[in-house]
Amino acid sequence: MRTLPFLLVTVVSGAIAGTILGLINLGVVEPFIDKAIELEIQNDIQAGQTVNMNEITDYRTWQKGGEIVGGLVYGISLSSLFGIVFAYSRKSLPGNNAKLKAIFLATIMCLVLFIVPGLKYPSNPPAVGDPNTIYYRQSLFVAFLVISGLGALGVGVLVKKLNQTA
């Protein structure tokens, strides 16, 4: 397959997958968030504070729409990254079947982007509620993401060199 049609198919499939992700989050996650907001509103009312329901309703409408758009952008971003990396590295990936090469690359990308950083820095760390540490925690996560990516790249270069000498 030529590179441009391949990248186009990759981006379109990422857009579809991202939209599905946003819709699933809307159906599965949002009911829990709505219940949590209802509890907060009840606590505010019991504490004697005034609650502007129109403001909350308008804000939640934007959030829910943004969740679908965010999923779309996320899907396009990941699929674009995959498509570009695959287009440049398909000749150096192991195997002779394009589907197996794509699965291999997707597995490596999943490990580098999600599993390894998630093992070191979980999505809900103990200091998650402390606004004073957000920059520090985000910097550590991004640094570990870079280390993970460079480690995978280093292993790939090492394997290629070893195969050339053998």
Image: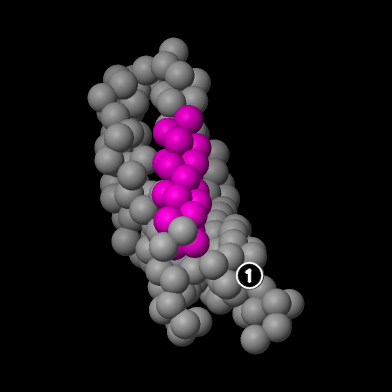
Name the main secondary structure of what is drawn in magenta: helix
Residue depicted at 46% across the width and 84% down the height: 97
Residue depicted at 48% across the width and 30% down the height: 143
Residue depicted at 70% across the width and 77% down the height: 3
In which quadrant of the rendered image does the C terminus lie?
bottom left
- Which of 129/79 is in front? 79
- Mark 1 is surrounded, within 10 Å at the Cα level, by few (under 14), some (14 to 19) or many (20 or more) other residues, namely some
Q: Is residue 73 magenta?
A: no
Residue 76 placement (x, y as % from top left): 60, 63
Residue 2 placement (x, y as % from top left): 70, 83
Residue depicted at 49% across the width and 55% down the height: 161
Image: magenta residue range:
143-164
Local SS, label 1: helix
Horizontal side of 92 relative to 1 (left or right) equals left
Residue 164 placement (x, y as % from top left): 49, 61
- Residue behind mark 1: 87
